Amino acid sequence: MRNTLVNPGVGELTYEIRNIVTVAEKLQVHGLQINWENIGDPVAKGETIPQWMKEIVTKALMLDETYGYCHTRGVLETRRFISEQTNDIGGAQINPDDIIFFNGLGDAIAKVYGNLKRETRILIPSPTYTTHSTGETAHANAGPVTYRLQPENNWYPDLEDVKNHVKYNPSICGITIVNPDNPTGMVLPEHMLREIVTIAGEYGLFLIADEIYNNIIYNGQRTVPLAAVIGDVPAVAMRGISKEFPWPGARCGWLEFYNTGKDQRFREYVNSILNSKMNEVCSTTLPQKTLPLIFTHPEYRNYLGERVARYEKMSNIAYDILGKVPGLLVNRTNGAFYMAVAFKDGLLTNRQSLPIPGREIRELVENITGGGGVPPDKRFVYYMLAHTGICTVPLSSFSTPLQGFRITLLEKDESEFRKVLRTLAQKITEYLDS
Ligand SMILES: Cc1ncc(COP(=O)(O)O)c(C=O)c1O
């Protein structure tokens, strides 16, 4: 090549959640039994899809129109259904043209950041779900601009930190929130959401609210969708079916734009997102066709309620077991199905280890973790994986200087989950003492 083809630093945009799978699969070949606590796919963790849902999908497949392109923004009846649902909340009022469907919310997230001018920055949480940090930093070709979620305070955002960033960094034009949050399981209280809206309004920013877990909240917690409190601040809400139905393989998510009529610059930006979608014609028709039928099915609420009750149970098991381990900062999760656990400052080093049986596995792990610059929590995660078969994700891969790990709460078998958590608790202590 006579020129470089990618931006400098692009190789750093690795996705640790998937990287560790590659290694775990290698370990599997060497005979290690893996407990997958790393990936947020309920189906991969054994969720069974109810018969009534399969019947709705099957019926949609029998219609010829399901095989055609749909409107660039998405199937009109589905957008009408969603806009009515949002309008019923009683806050932001939208019409079907304020909605655009994408092939998964990941695709939508990439478009939201990718259509911004390079110099325009979005303030994202730290830790943050990697697709947001990757999308934002790739568009800016620079490191992330983040506000702190506080492990010492239920992972709630540090609102002073948000304000200071916005006040002193004029390139920030928007703030991202993920509510409920991945990777922390934090649910943002309504008053904090309102404060963030106020900050955005005061400084002429727009908000990005990833609400893919908005109907997965437990432990008696409450929040409200951004639509309820947005007032006249421009905003994008992000929603999808990957976690809720759950149907991640459908690759179906959508954006809802609020207050596009109230700001010319925001309207231009929304149009640029629509234009980039036009280049792809549209998103997959099938899941969109089924969406209103699934959401309004008489079984839907009970079905989702049962799953949410299970996540609540697993959340509390994880909290009760890990909360007793010295050296950890553990918060009860109240939404989504992840728990982020941080080690107290300075506890992890690059010398700790656990015994790894078998020369090949040991060498593999030593190679991955031995080089300079490997974060200590990455070392921890790989030694834990090779010693116990428990596959977690290093917290530092979620754009945070904090050291820790993320587990999922998706295990269906309660006694298996307790066993995994007890092993993890015991081995953390051994690792820290090693
Ligand atoms: C917070 C958050 N947003 C978006 C996504 C992407 O979802 P999709 O499967 O629709 O691309 C995920 C997936 O894990 C997520 O956790």
Image (tube, helix red, strand yellow):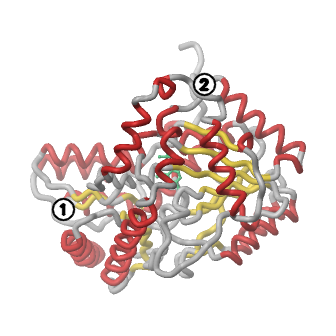
Residue 57 percent across, percent down from the top left: 40, 40
User: Which of the two marks, 1 or 2, is nearer to us in this view?
Assistant: 2
- Residue at position x 33%, y 73% in the image: 314
Residue named by callout 1: 387
Picture quadrant of residue 383:
bottom left
Q: Position of residue 140 (x, y in %)?
A: 69, 41
Specify the label residue 111 is tagged with: none
**Ligand 1 has an atom within 8 Å of the beta carbon of the residue at disc 2:** no
Given residues 350 and 100, the one toward you in this image is 100
How many marks the image carries: the answer is 2
Q: How would you rate the neighbour count of disc 1 (Cα within 10 Å): few for under 14, some for 14-19, many for 20 or more?
A: some
The reply to whether discs 1 and 2 touch (Cβ–Cβ < 8 Å) is no
The answer to whether 388 appears left or right of 133 in the picture is left
Q: Amino acid at mark 1?
A: His
Residue 13, percent from left and from top: 51, 42
**Few, some or many C-alpha atoms within 10 Å of disc 2 (few <14, some 14-19, many ≥20)?**
few
- Name the residue located 37 percent from the left edge and 80 percent from the top edge: 316
Picture coordinates of residue 322, whole percent (x, y): 33, 79
Q: Marks 1 and 2, how far apart in space? A: 46 Å
> At numbered mark 1, what does the secondary structure look like: helix, strand or loop?
helix
Residue carrying label 2:
280
State which quarter of the image contains the C terminus.
bottom left
User: Does the beta carbon at disc 1 come under 8 Å from ligand 1?
Assistant: no
Closer to the camera in the image, 330 or 294: 294
Tell me which corner region of the image, top left, top right, bottom left or bottom right, holds residue 163: bottom right
Mark toward the start of the polypeptide (1 vs 2)? 2
Query: Is residue 338 something one can see in this rendering?
Result: no
- The answer to whether residue 372 is left or right of residue 35 is right
Which amino acid type corresponds to the residue marked 2 in the rendered image?
Glu
Query: Is 159 situated left or right of 138 in this image?
Result: right
